[in-house]
Amino acid sequence: MKPCFDRIAVLGLGLLGGSVALASKQRGLAKCVAGGVRRPAALEAAVARGIVDEGGSFEDAVRGANLVVLATPVFAMVDLVRTIAPHLQEGALVTDVGSVKAGVAEALPGLLPRGVHYVGAHPMAGSHLSGLDHARGDLFDGAPCVVIEGAPEAARDRVSVFWTDLGARVLPRDAATHDGEVAWMSHIPHILAFAFAGALKAAPPGADEVAGSGFHDFTRIAHSHPELWGDILTSNRKAIAAPLQSVAESLAELGRAIETGDAEIVERWLAQARAALSLASPPPAGNDITRRVRTAHSRGLNASPGSAISAAEVGDPIDPNE
Amino acid sequence: MKPCFDRIAVLGLGLLGGSVALASKQRGLAKCVAGGVRRPAALEAAVARGIVDEGGSFEDAVRGANLVVLATPVFAMVDLVRTIAPHLQEGALVTDVGSVKAGVAEALPGLLPRGVHYVGAHPMAGSHLSGLDHARGDLFDGAPCVVIEGAPEAARDRVSVFWTDLGARVLPRDAATHDGEVAWMSHIPHILAFAFAGALKAAPPGADEVAGSGFHDFTRIAHSHPELWGDILTSNRKAIAAPLQSVAESLAELGRAIETGDAEIVERWLAQARAALSLASPPPAGNDITRRVRTAHSRGLNASPGSAISAAEVGDPIDPNE
C-alpha cells in the first residue's frame, strides 16, 4: 500500500536532505531519487555515496518529479520555490524539512502552479552536526515529524505516508501551533544553551577540566550551526518572545530562591520544576555511562503526558539512600 | 604499588557511595569494604548485592578503617564527622564525594582527632539518577575527580591514588577554585535546565510531543534530585552569584539580538558563543542516534582547551552543503 513515486527530488543535500534521499532509496519509495544542488561538486559526492541516483540544478532535479522535498534553510525556500515553480509537473507534491512554518505556509502555496500542492513538514531529527557526511538512512526512525494542516486532504495524506515510510511518527499541526510548540521545545533550549556558551568566556581558565557528562549533554545543542540557527530564531521570533520572557522570569525567581540560602525553599522550587518537566518528558532511564534506554528515548519514544513516569519512581530516594 | 587498605568504610550507600564501595571491592583496594548507614535495611541490600562486605551504623563502620569515604549529602557531613570522630583510628584518612568544598574544607579538619587527615574530593560522575540500585563499579572510569589541596602531601597522595585506582582522572584544586569552577560547569547548567523546566508549565498542551533528542539531552540534568540540588546550590551560592549574573545578561543580550529580526546579527552572536564553548569543550562527534563517540566524551575524555577541535572542523558546512 506504499505510495510509489516515480521520481523524488530532494533539493539541498545537507544532513536532512541527504538523509531523506538515502532513506527514500533504501526503503524503495521511488524509482528514482534525484538531488538538486547549487554546486555540482556536492552532487558528485552524493551520487558516489549512493545517496541519490542522479541530479543536477534545482530546476533539473524537479523535472518529472512527483514529490519534491525542500531541504534548504528556511530563508532560502521562497526564492527556491520561485526558481522551480515553472518546472514542476502537474500533480506534484512539495514538502520540506524547515524548522519554522508560519512564513512558508503562507508564502509557498501562492507560488506554485495549479495542481501542485505544498504540505509543510518538520522532522525533529536534526543534530548539532550538519552536512552530507552525516546523512543516515535511519535518521528519522522514531523521530516526531510535524505535518502541517491546510492542504487538501489527499495531498496531506500522501505526504504523511511518505514521512511515516521514512520511519517518522507523524504529528498533525497547523503552522502557528507548530511554531509555538517548537519555540518551547527546541528554540528556547537552543537559546539557553547558546546564552550559557556565550557567557563561558568569563569562566576561569581550567574550569573546562571539571566538566562532566551533564555539562556535555546540556551544551551539545550550542554546537549547532550559527547560520542555520540565526535563520531559525529570527524567523520564529514572534513565537519565541513569550516563552523567552517566561524563562527569564523563572531564572530570576530561582536565583532569588538560591540567594535566600534556605535549602528547603530551593528544594521546593526545584521539585515543582522537575514535576513540570516530568509531565512534558519522563526522566530518561539508564545512567550517564551506559545510556541504554536513552537512545530509544531520544528517538521519540517518550510517553505522552498521561503516561509520564512520575519523578518519584525514578532516582529516588535521595543519594545516599541508606 | 597500590595502596592496600585493610578496611575502607563508605558512609552513605547511594549512587556515589555504593559505586565507591563496589569499585573498591572489584578492584581489590581493601581487605574489607564496610558500609555505614542510618537505616539497617539499606545495608542488607548492599551486602546481598555484594556492594559491601559488611557494615552497620556509621560508628561501627569506621572502627578500624584506614580510609573513610563520606558519601552523604554535603549538609549532613559536619554532623556525620562529629558522630564518627571519637571512633576513628589514628592514621586514618577521610575523603568525601561532596559537590561543594569550601565549607567542609574549613569545618572538617578541626573536628578530626590528631593524626587523622581529611582530603576532600569531588568525582564528577553523578547522574540524574540516584540510589544504590544505580551503583556501578565503573562509574568513575575516566571521570574527572577534583582532589582538594591543603592536607599534608602524603595524605593527599594516598587519597589521589585511591581515586585514580577507582578509574578517575585526578585534578588538584584548592577548595575555592573548585567551587568557582563547578559553579560554572555544573551548577549554572543545572540552574538553567531547572529554570527552563519550571517555565514549562506555561507551554501549550501537546508541545511535549514535538520534543526531540536535543530537548531530552538539554533537560536531563533537571531530572536530578531536588533535595540534593537544593543543598548544593545554596551551599555554593556565593560562587554561583557572578556566573548567574553573567548568564542572565548573556540571555538578555541574545534575546535583544533575536528581536532585531536581523539573522546576521543573531548568527554572529551564536558564532562567538559557539567558539567560546568549543574552547571549553570540543563538540561531540557522532550523531544523535548512534552516540558512538558521545560515551567516551561524556566519560571525561574531552581534550584540554589547547587541543580543542575548532567548530569549523565539525558539522560544517551548513546544512545543506551543496
Image (spheres, coloured by chain):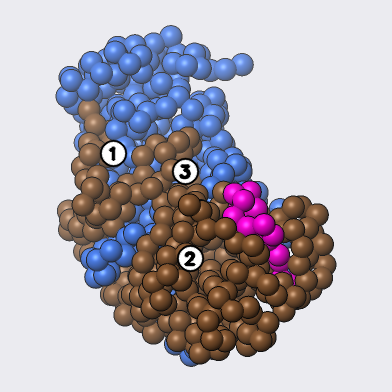
Chain colours: A blue, B brown
- Mark 2 or 3, nearer chain start: 2
Residue B159, numbered circle: 2
Between A32 and B67, the one nearer to me in the picture: B67
Segment tinted magenta in the rendering? B21-37
User: Tag 2, which chain?
Assistant: B
* Tags 2 and 1 touching, CB below 8 Å: no
* Tags 2 and 3 touching, CB below 8 Å: no
Q: Which residue in the protein does label 1 denote?
A: B315
Can residue B220 be seen at all in this image of the molecule?
no
Q: Position of residue A151 (x, y in %)?
A: 46, 36
Residue B171 is inside the magenta segment:
no
Calculate the distance from the C-alpha at mark 2 to the C-alpha at mark 3: 27 Å
The amino acid on which the numbered mark 3 sits, given as a three-letter code, is: Thr
Residue A312, numbered circle: none
Q: Is residue B42 left or right of residue B271?
A: right
Toward the top, the furthest residue is A31
Answer yes or no: are tags 1 and 3 on the same subunit: yes
Q: Position of residue B280 (x, y in %)?
A: 28, 57
Tag 3 secondary structure: helix
Q: Position of residue A218 (x, y in %)?
A: 42, 57
